[in-house]
Amino acid sequence: METGQIYHIYNHANGSENIFREKENYRFFLQQYKKHLEKVVDTYAYCLIPIHFHFLVKVKKADVLKKNSTFEKLDSLDEVEAKASKQFANLFISYTMAFNKKYDRKGSLFMKNFKRKPIESIEQWQETFLYIHINPIKHKFSNKIEDWNWSSWHAYNNMESRSLLARPKAIGYFDNIDNLLYCSEEKRRRILNMNLE
């Protein structure tokens, strides 16, 4: 993963099994995300649904990462970027180990390689941000963005709350919070009017 690059990160269950079965699974995954990635990426958006997850993140720049004890002894940019990718792998491994222990299962839980799509334009960034938050509607888990508990939407809908999200930067991509809310509602209406078979 390139330092300073914005990515849409996503992955799916390995097979038809849910990767989140109950509330505690969601909470634990986010706890592990914070543990492994808070100092590696700036997070703009996320959504967890039973069968997969999405994140919109920017990998911190190399000079910022090298101030982190996990990265400080790395010499080359290639090593820093490999370590940033490894932090995502550590998240998935730690979650899978706990999940397997809890549910008495064996083997991989996620598809082998997590997907990472570079974001190359403001329009692509906006569309990805909206898509992530609309995901529970697309997959028929809810009809309203705010009804789904396991997304970053609540942090944008309640700006007074504390959050680890990079909210000011994200809102800046939409100019202001009112436009962000308007665009989200328009996207929701389009999704609900589509045949999503």
Image (cartoon, rainbow, N blue to C red):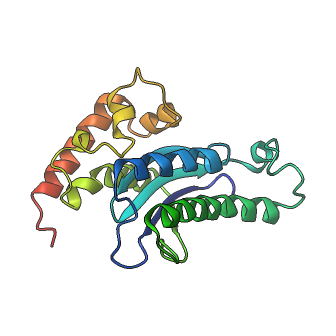
Please say if 42 is above or below 114.
above
Q: Is 140 on the left-hand or right-hand side of 48?
A: left
Residue 107 at x, y = what percent? 52, 78
The residue under the point 64% across, 50% down is 36
The residue under the point 42% across, 24% down is 161
Dividing the picture into quarters, in which one does residue 154 lie? top left
Count of numbered tags? 0
Q: Is 56 on the left-hand or right-hand side of 66?
A: left
Dividing the picture into quarters, in which one does residue 16 lie? bottom left
Residue 135 at x, y = what percent? 29, 56
Residue 47 at x, y = what percent? 38, 51
The residue under the point 48% across, 43% down is 44
Q: Which residue is at the front of the view, 192 or 102? A: 102
Task: Inspect this view and state whether residue 46 appears.
Answer: no
Please say if 11 is above or below 66.
below
Q: Which residue is at the front of the view, 88 or 123? A: 88
Residue farthest top in this picture: 160
Quadrant housing the C terminus: bottom left
Task: Inspect this view and state whether residue 45 appears.
Answer: yes
Residue 52 at x, y = what percent? 38, 64
Q: Which residue is at the front of the view, 166 or 113? A: 113
Quadrant housing the N terminus: bottom right
Q: Which residue is at the front of the view, 133 or 37? A: 37
Please say if 168 is above or below 109.
above
The residue under the point 43% across, 65% down is 103
